[in-house]
Image: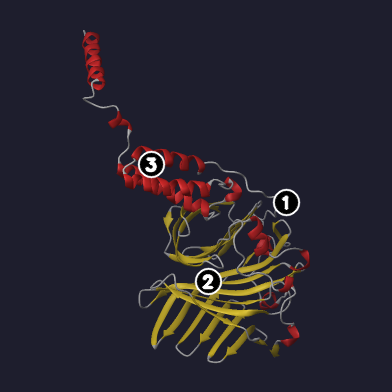
């Protein structure tokens, strides 16, 4: 009985479809909204591919990304003209190209593996003033002193400031010395000041400082054991920022230089910490609280190419210092090299693994790490960036062992393969100003 009723119903449906009462095309053709939604998803994938906003060493590069971007533009035009079938076909082509990964053209090399045994902390220690004064580690020369600050101001806006003194692996000062700042009130605007005057170098028992003055502009960069600060001033503004650091992350656990990329040894240490800043802009005083990072990087020299030159050739770097109230540290990923150091609950620890997952190109990403304190999941949202140097700054939120961390701040240096070297070596790494020309005050 049941069978006899089903057959006539199936025949009736078939007849109705055949005569066009329910056209087959209406079930197959997506709506304009569905096409737009899919195009948006593919556009984000295209942007991620174009900016290499992902781990290319793990997945490979998308050589068809430029062609896919063209298909997406054509699909947008087809949708606007009402050609939904044509738009769908173009999106299919873009989707296929954005799924075809090719391993990057990297020669085989044995990158250092500091995370292989995370319980072995090597020779990690809180950097001393003697470390801060060093001009080389493991015969790898100093590249720079760098300081950056990110925080929230009393006016509700977010603020960034950075300053650096370069040596570029030469043992000499390489000009310019730079100060920069920006605000979330106008995130695409970066006020940058280049000093092309040699600084006065002052060395004391417990600190060093560089002071440079040009006309009405001045910058003082001071580094001590556990403290770092900058003070900038000109005719219309002044910016001071200071941080306290409680730990030091050392590349390759300070047991030797780190082989990051072929021919690119690197050494040194990074320090993050709680920071405060004061901005006086056109007479208005703004106090800000956040995080800062102090970089003491060593690379280049006789042992090989400098880090950025190698990065531009091979890519793809993720250098991520961060700080929340519950955890702080740094993640470093370039080529086959992965390194990380975390400071949680007053203890230094190394995660056994971590992964980077893109969310939105040049804006957001996630890092998931396995740590001795439990799973750490962090979501980074960048509100500003310096395109020339590939530096980004923003905020971070996350969880540790399933418990929510307090909101914090972060930095990112992300240099893609084949990018632009905005901080090239000077005169083939010969430097530009002999050390003896730097005025030293003891």
Q: Position of residue 416 (x, y in %)?
A: 58, 58
Near-viewer residue (421 or 331): 421
Where 71 falls versus 161 (above or below)?
above
Q: Earlier in the sequence, mark 1 or mark 2?
A: 1
Q: Residue at x 29, y 27 (%)?
A: 24
Q: Residue at x 75, y 86 (%)?
A: 436
Image quarter where the N terminus lies is top left
Near-viewer residue (61 or 109): 61
Q: Position of residue 47 (x, y in %)?
A: 47, 53
Q: Residue at x 51, y 42 (%)?
A: 97
Picture disc at residue 172: none
Picture disc at residue 87: 3
Query: Callout 3: 10 Å neighbours few (<14), some, many (20+)?
Result: many
The number of discs equals: 3
Q: Earlier in the sequence, mark 2 or mark 3?
A: 3
Question: Which structural element holds mark 3?
Answer: helix
Can residue 378 be seen?
no
């Amino acid at each position: 009985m049941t069978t006899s009723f089903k057959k006539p119903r199936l025949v009736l449906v078939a007849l109705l479809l055949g005569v066009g009462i329910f056209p087959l095309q209406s079930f197959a053709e997506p709506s304009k909204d569905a096409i737009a939604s899919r195009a948006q998803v593919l556009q984000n994938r295209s942007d991620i591919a174009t900016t290499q906003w992902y781990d290319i060493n793990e997945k490979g590069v998308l050589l068809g990304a430029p062609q896919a971007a063209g298909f997406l533009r054509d699909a947008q035009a087809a949708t606007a003209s009402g050609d939904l079938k044509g738009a769908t076909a173009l999106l299919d082509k873009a989707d296929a190209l954005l799924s075809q990964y090719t391993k990057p053209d990297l020669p085989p090399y044995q990158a250092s593996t500091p995370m292989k045994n995370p319980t072995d902390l090597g020779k990690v220690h809180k950097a001393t003033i003697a470390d801060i004064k060093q001009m080389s580690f493991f015969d790898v020369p100093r590249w720079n002193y760098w300081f950056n600050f990110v925080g929230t101001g009393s006016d509700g806006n977010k603020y960034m400031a950075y300053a650096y003194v370069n040596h570029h692996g030469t043992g000499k000062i390489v000009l310019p010395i730079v100060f920069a700042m920006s605000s979330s009130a106008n995130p695409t605007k970066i006020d940058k000041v280049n000093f092309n005057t040699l600084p006065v170098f002052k060395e004391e028992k417990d600190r060093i400082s560089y002071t440079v003055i040009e006309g009405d502009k001045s910058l003082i960069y001071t580094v001590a054991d556990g403290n770092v600060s900058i003070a900038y001033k000109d005719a219309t503004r002044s910016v001071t920022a200071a941080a306290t650091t409680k730990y030091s992350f050392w590349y390759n656990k300070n047991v030797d230089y780190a082989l990051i990329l072929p021919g690119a040894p690197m050494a040194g240490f990074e320090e993050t910490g709680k920071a405060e800043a004061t901005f006086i802009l056109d007479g208005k005083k703004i106090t800000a609280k956040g995080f800062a990072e102090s970089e003491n990087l060593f690379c280049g020299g006789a042992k090989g190419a400098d880090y950025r030159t190698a990065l531009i050739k091979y890519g793809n770097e993720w250098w991520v210092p961060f700080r929340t109230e519950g955890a702080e540290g740094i993640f470093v990923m370039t080529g086959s090299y992965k390194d990380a150091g975390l400071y949680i609950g007053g203890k230094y620890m190394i995660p056994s693994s971590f992964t980077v997952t893109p969310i939105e190109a040049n804006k957001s990403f996630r890092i998931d790490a396995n740590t001795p304190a439990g799973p750490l999941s962090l979501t980074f949202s960048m509100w500003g960036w310096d395109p020339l140097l590939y530096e980004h700054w923003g905020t971070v939120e996350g969880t540790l062992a399933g418990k929510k961390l307090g909101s914090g701040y972060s930095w990112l240096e992300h240099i893609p393969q084949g990018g632009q070297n905005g901080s090239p070596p000077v005169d083939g790494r010969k430097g530009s100003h002999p050390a003896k020309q730097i005025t030293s005050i003891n």
